[in-house]
Amino acid sequence: MTLSQWMLVLAIVLVIEGIGPLLFPNRWRNYLRELTAMENNALQRVGGALVTAGIVLLIIFS
């Protein structure tokens, strides 16, 4: 992938990440409160699952 393609991917991620707080600030705040209440190992499992899903999608579509 070229640098331009990586920047495009980063831009898409930033847009997607910004939709929640932009459109639903109260729900987003409640979601963050729930995340902070979770145990560390639960957060690590969620993070690991997201990273794994992302890697699988990168392999499939690249």
Image: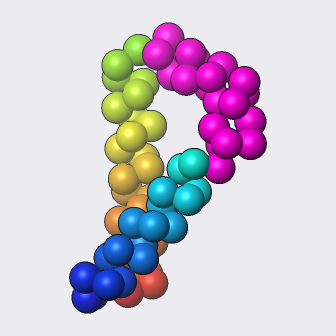
Magenta stretch, overall SS: helix
Residue at the image point whose x is 42% and y is 24% from the top:
42
Residue 6 against residue 13 in the figure, above or below: below
- Image coordinates of residue 7 in percent, x first then y, are 35, 74
Residue 28 lies in the magenta stretch: yes
Q: Residue 6's spot in the image, x, y percent?
A: 32, 76
Which residue does the image show at 37% across and 56% down from the upper left? 52
* In-image side of 27 versus 33 (left or right): right
Q: Position of residue 41 (x, y in %)?
A: 35, 22
Residue 30 falls inside the magenta stretch: yes
Instruction: Name the foreground residue: 55 vs 10.
Output: 10
Residue at 45%, 67% (x, y): give it: 11
State how many labels appear. 0
Compared with residue 3, is residue 46 higher up or lower down, i.e. above or below? above
User: Can the viewer see residue 42 in this picture?
Assistant: yes
Residue that extends furthest to the front in the rendered view of this protein: 22
Residue drawn at x 74%, y 36% as measured from the top left: 24
**Is residue 56 visible to us here?**
no
Q: Quadrant of residue 44?
A: top left
- Is 3 left, or right, of 43 in this rendering? left
Q: Quadrant of residue 48?
A: top left
Q: Quadrant of the N terminus?
A: bottom left
Residue 35 position (above or below residue 15): above
Which image quadrant: the C terminus?
Answer: bottom left
Q: Nearer the viewer, residue 24 or 50?
A: 24
Q: How was this image coloured?
A: rainbow
Write down the region rendered in magenta.
Answer: 19-38
